Image (cartoon, grey):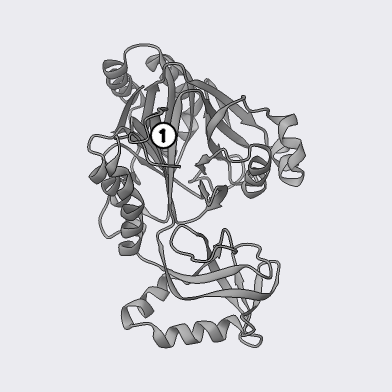
């Protein structure tokens, strides 16, 4: 199992294709099994010819990708410049099946999860999926819920296309085809292992509360008191630095398993607090929530985001290095979050020197938390790929 990755900053597509193909072929030889390709939106209007030429140039049996407002290469995050990031691999014995779910099928799947296998029947023994989706036509939360039911326990990583401002502007690749709607993806099966890190970049503040009254996305009571009263109590306990962090927004974590006795980082699905009613004391959050769930408020900043990612990476430094990786970071990260460029990729390459990785800045990131796949915001979702092995020392436990 071998990977090769590269990022190129250039306005000339011919020069990009030449440089990418030379680098990939020099390292992997001809007949690449799979390539993930992420051009910046500067090349969206030339996507069809570009996809066809690049696939032929690197000899990829399977190729998927999408345009993004920023791309991520093996050493740098590239924002605002014409660029491309590519990661390709030779995967002996591994099944790699590309698929496309149209906007119409995506809507049907989201409405009725039983429609999933009519629109797409995943290969037996699928180990994990990569999915890239148009935010205007793919109701991803419903689609992921259907996969969570129909392909229970199979992790999904990926992201929503960024940079498009209206329907029809998104660009998705699948081999020689270019689509402007729906979902493209890859199903990996066979002797391949994946460990997915979803770094939500938050830290908890205050106690864990039980939701004692809620309707849809509105929380009316936390432990029989109004959420605004609870927030007021938290403010009294925060130091000045943490109070300043509230300018970045207040977040709330939904426990993935509310029956779990002790909850910590990695046990919560982070959502934003998006509104409040001063009269009733209720708050609205960016998700549907139910009475009986346990929640905890969270703060986010650059330091916390970096620490969270490094904390989640640290166990992997004790095992064999990955063969390659895919990275999907929020377009609100990068230099929008960190004071310096390359915030996420530098943390990753600090643990894995020379790791072949590529990805893009997303308008929503896909990854598993607590054994279920979700659509996230403000996260870094990283897939670390290793050969399947029976040696327990060679890779972290699931």
Q: For the N terminus, which image quadrant?
A: top left
* SS under mark 1: strand
For the image, the number of numbered tags is 1
Horizontal arrangement in the rendering, residue 51 relative to residue 17 (left or right):
right
Horizontal arrangement in the rendering, residue 283 relative to residue 317 (left or right):
right
Considering only vertical position in the picture, is 231 above or below 218?
A: below
Return the residue nearer the eye: 208 or 397. 397
CA neighbours of label 1 inside 10 A, class few (<14), some (14 to 19), many (20+):
many
Q: For the C terminus, which image quadrant?
A: top left
Return the residue nearer the eye: 122 or 301. 122
**x and y, in percent, of residue 366 in the image:** 52, 46
Which quarter of the figure has residue 121? top right
Which quarter of the figure has residue 318? top left
Q: Residue at x 50, y 23 (%)?
A: 190
Question: Would residue 314 be seen by someone viewing this image from the given angle?
Answer: yes
Q: Residue at x 41, y 28 (%)?
A: 390
Considering only vertical position in the picture, is 292 above or below 92?
A: below
Query: For mark 1, what is the residue?
Result: 39
Considering only vertical position in the picture, is 98 above or below 31?
A: below
**x and y, in percent, of residue 326 in the image:** 40, 37
**x and y, in percent, of residue 235 in the image:** 44, 84
**x and y, in percent, of residue 239 in the image:** 33, 83
Question: Would residue 330 be seen by someone viewing this image from the given angle?
Answer: no
Horizontal arrangement in the rendering, residue 398 relative to residue 19 (left or right):
right
Which residue of the protein is positioned furthest toward the top in this rendering? 30
Which quarter of the figure has residue 282? bottom right
Q: Residue at x 47, y 72 (%)?
A: 250
Q: Residue at x 44, y 31 (%)?
A: 193
């Amino acid at each position: 199992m071998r990977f090769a990755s590269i990022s190129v900053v250039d306005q000339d597509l011919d020069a990009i294709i030449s440089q990418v193909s030379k680098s990939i072929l020099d390292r992997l030889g001809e007949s690449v099994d799979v390539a993930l390709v992420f051009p910046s939106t500067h090349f969206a209007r030339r996507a069809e010819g570009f996809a066809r030429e690049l696939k032929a140039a690197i000899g990829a049996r399977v190729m998927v990708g999408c345009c993004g407002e920023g791309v991520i290469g093996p050493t740098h995050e590239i924002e605002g410049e014409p660029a491309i990031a590519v990661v390709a691999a030779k995967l002996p014995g591994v099944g790699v099946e590309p698929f496309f779910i149209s906007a119409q099928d995506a809507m049907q799947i989201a409405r009725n999860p039983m429609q999933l296998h009519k629109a797409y029947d995943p290969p037996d023994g699928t180990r994990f999926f990569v999915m890239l989706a148009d935010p205007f036509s793919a109701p991803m939360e419903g689609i992921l819920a259907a996969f969570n039911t129909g392909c229970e326990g199979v992790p999904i990583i990926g992201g929503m296309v960024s940079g498009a401002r209206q329907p029809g502007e998104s660009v998705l690749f699948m081999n020689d085809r270019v689509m402007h709607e729906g979902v493209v993806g890859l199903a990996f099966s066979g002797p391949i292992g994946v460990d997915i890190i979803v770094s939500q970049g938050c830290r908890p503040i205050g106690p864990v509360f039980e939701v004692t009254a809620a309707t849809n996305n509105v929380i009316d009571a936390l432990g029989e008191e109004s959420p605004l009263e609870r927030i007021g109590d938290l403010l009294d306990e925060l130091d000045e630095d943490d109070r300043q962090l509230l300018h970045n927004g207040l977040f709330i974590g939904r426990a993935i398993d509310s029956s779990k006795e002790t909850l910590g980082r990695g046990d919560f699905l982070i959502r934003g607090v998006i509104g409040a009613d001063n009269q009733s004391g209720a708050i609205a959050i960016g998700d549907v929530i139910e009475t009986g769930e346990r929640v905890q408020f969270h703060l986010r900043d650059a330091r916390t985001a970096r620490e969270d990612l490094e904390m989640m990476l640290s166990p992997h430094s004790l095992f064999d290095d990955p063969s390659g990786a895919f990275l999907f970071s929020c377009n609100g990260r990068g230099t929008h979050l960190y004071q310096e460029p390359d915030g996420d990729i530098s943390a990753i390459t600090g643990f894995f020197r020379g790791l072949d990785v590529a990805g893009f800045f997303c308008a929503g990131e896909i990854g598993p938390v607590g054994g279920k796949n979700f659509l996230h915001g403000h996260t870094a979702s990283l897939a670390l790929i290793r050969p399947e092995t029976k040696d327990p020392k060679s890779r972290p436990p699931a």
